[in-house]
Image (cartoon, coloured by chain):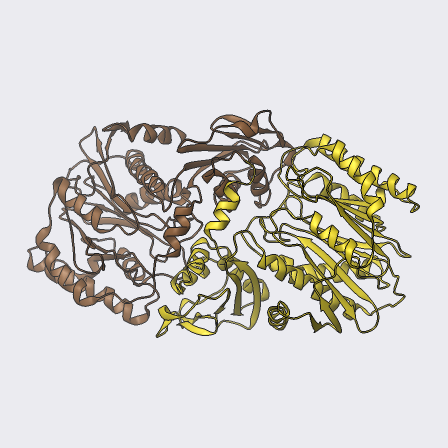
Chain colours: A yellow, B brown
Amino acid sequence: MTDNTDKHAEHVYADAVEIAGGRLIRTQGVTSPAGFRGAGIRAGIKASGNPDLALVVNEGPDLAAAGVFTTNKVKAAPVLWSQQVLASNALRAVVLNSGGANACTGPGGFQDTHATAEALAAALSNWGTDTGAGEVAVCSTGLIGDRLPMDKVLAGVEEIVHELAGGISGGTDAAYAIMTTDTVPKQVALHHADKWNVGGMGKGAGMLAPALATMLVVLTTDAVATAEQLDEALRGATRMTFDRLDIDGATSTNDTVLLLASGASGVTPNQDELNAAVLAVCDDLAAQMMADAEGVTKRVTVTVRGAASESHALIGARTVARDSLVKTALFGSDPNWGRVLAAIGIAPIELDPDKISVTFNGRPVCIDGVGAPGAREVDLSGIDIALEIDLGVGDAEVSIRTTDLSHAYVEENSAYSS
Amino acid sequence: MTDNTDKHAEHVYADAVEIAGGRLIRTQGVTSPAGFRGAGIRAGIKASGNPDLALVVNEGPDLAAAGVFTTNKVKAAPVLWSQQVLASNALRAVVLNSGGANACTGPGGFQDTHATAEALAAALSNWGTDTGAGEVAVCSTGLIGDRLPMDKVLAGVEEIVHELAGGISGGTDAAYAIMTTDTVPKQVALHHADKWNVGGMGKGAGMLAPALATMLVVLTTDAVATAEQLDEALRGATRMTFDRLDIDGATSTNDTVLLLASGASGVTPNQDELNAAVLAVCDDLAAQMMADAEGVTKRVTVTVRGAASESHALIGARTVARDSLVKTALFGSDPNWGRVLAAIGIAPIELDPDKISVTFNGRPVCIDGVGAPGAREVDLSGIDIALEIDLGVGDAEVSIRTTDLSHAYVEENSAYSS
């Protein structure tokens, strides 16, 4: 992932980047692949009046799909519903709302999700696309614990099907409508040289952690692919991207990542090509989420190398990425490497304190467990910080994306529900 | 522990509290038991000029002792040294410095610790108390990664033996000299009705977490007890107190808790009495550390009950106590119980989302996984918050002490080393 990360850094300033056999462009999203339409409207769910209802529809010819969901044992109603829908492997549409998570809402909340899917299926059928409720996934994001204003949700569902559009506008409208504490919409499309495409949109700014960051992500492709092929591509990509984005160690009740394939390009990429394209899109969305995380002032990559295994490297990197004392030091642009040693020392992994070396932005600050000359003078005043830890006991390596712990994070999260 | 906690809350406003067959008094500390002298001086280790060198000496007749140390695999030089000293079970003195952790300092740092013990043993021998370096434990606290100014440490060791005093003053001076970001010294003494005593002092305000909060604690008793009896009392007490204090999930390289017994009272309590007294002193010191934690604006107790086992209850309570989104909500006096559900849902323990109930300060906010009426209106504006989670799957219960995550925590920790 190191190469990709470097390219993304560059990509922020460029129009497109060449990767995975295609070109990645951030001004396009889920309606960039052929066969997809999208929309985003103001349904009145959010008190702010901002856009809060999004829709992505697959017009086929294929309705193949795959999904990955939160590992939290407390799952929101829309997650329970969409898991059932995905079991059928035919997915016509995804309807997403911000302004409320519909989590911890009991049987009534589940009925609300079901009613939303029924209403959307009816509206799409009336509009000319025959759809069953069992082909409609539902995603929700916002405050946990309150029922949704169903009068507004159902009226919005009626209205939104009339706003469906392809090209750039439909996907962009949808990307705006799923934002919560996000400050910018997050979307990207990859145009493969072989004339097929992958598009994606995501939201996620806080409660971002292991086994899926708190996020909703919808990915689309016009490639021809089976549900099994999509599943392999999606699981491989999430494992390397969203699962390695850890802002605050918290995992949402609502995490959902969906991949829909229309087959409209008529092109059948091989599995490796599909994997690479989906990975590139997910990696870019994960980078966008890191860059817009709640209270972020530093974009931090924690790399653990020289670990006994990939699992050890991952646990080590995650432990450091979650450490409040490391994160506050980085907020202060303070090269306080001793806190990195203290953090990695509590990770339940194989390590030898006398073999650990640490660099900040490539500058050695600790060599074989002891401070390096000039360690306290390393300049961390820039936005991007690469923290690398070499354990010196093996050859496995993993990187985790995280951020600093800032006043803005505390401010934003101490005033969210009230 | 619930009863003890209640008594402590009351104890803040009272001169003494009856507990464990004796009276607990916070104006006395390690030199309250017979047979101990203490001192604290300004040795010039801290740039601020504040007291930074402390000494506790056991004048016997017994030199029994026990110790518990950090579980961090990256251990400071004084921890490695003191672990060796404790293996002999005879402990004459403990010398402690603030102003530097002497961690990640390599073989040179270990030699510094050894030289400190040698110098103190020589100074005590000159002063008339025959002492070997192997009977001197060393503790250090402060910034990780720098060598100590040994000229100042060794000169301070020469000087401090002349300042040794019993009664109240010696222990109080020592308690002041081990402070780092602590704002108040922490000490307490328990006077048992059977004419024996336990005293203690501690420091610890940040990097406070599992398997010992980041802390130095020295406990003394004039009871007659073997090293084995002291060890049982100390391990039992730390497991129930310091191990259940979790401010920020970080574990220091320097955590040390020592218990020294002089036998000077001539009284031999039974094991249960000894356990109870040591537990009461540790519990009180843990409460003092919570109340003075870095950036604290709320003193929070997270209780998980109805768990399948004590281990499950502990993991659940710790997971919630560490959750940044729960902690920032509490800072904002926001009864955002949905974050509590999201947090407990990622704990690797047995639970049924539909059986979880939550109370804030005794007010139900979630019943069987669904919000309770009036949940958003619960008043959390006070300093003390009791967060109780009933899993409804068993009968085990554990409480963890923690704090909120405030602007002051971020401020203090983003500017510590620079």
* Residue B159 as seen in the image, left or right of residue B383: left
The answer to whether residue A117 shows anywhere in this view is no
Q: Position of residue B293 (x, y in %)?
A: 36, 44
Please identify the quadrant where the N terminus of chain A is shown.
Answer: bottom right
Residue B361 is left or right of residue A399, and the answer is left
Q: Name the spot of residue B111 as percent of width and height, x first.
A: 25, 69
- Compared to residue B94, the image places residue A126 above or below, namely above
Residue at 56% across, 37% down: A417
Q: Residue at 29% across / 31% down in the picture?
A: B12
Does the rendering let one see residue B321? yes
Q: Position of residue A92 (x, y in %)?
A: 85, 49
Residue at image coords 86%, 63%: A224
Q: Is residue B378 left or right of residue A117?
A: left
* Quadrant including the C terminus of chain A: top right
Q: Splitting the image into 4 quarters, where does residue B133 fall?
A: bottom left
Q: Across the whole image, how many numbered discs are drawn on residues?
A: 0
Q: Position of residue B141 (x, y in %)?
A: 29, 56
In the displayed structure, B392 sits above or below B119; it is above
Instruction: Give B122 or B41, whichever is nearer the viewer.
Output: B41
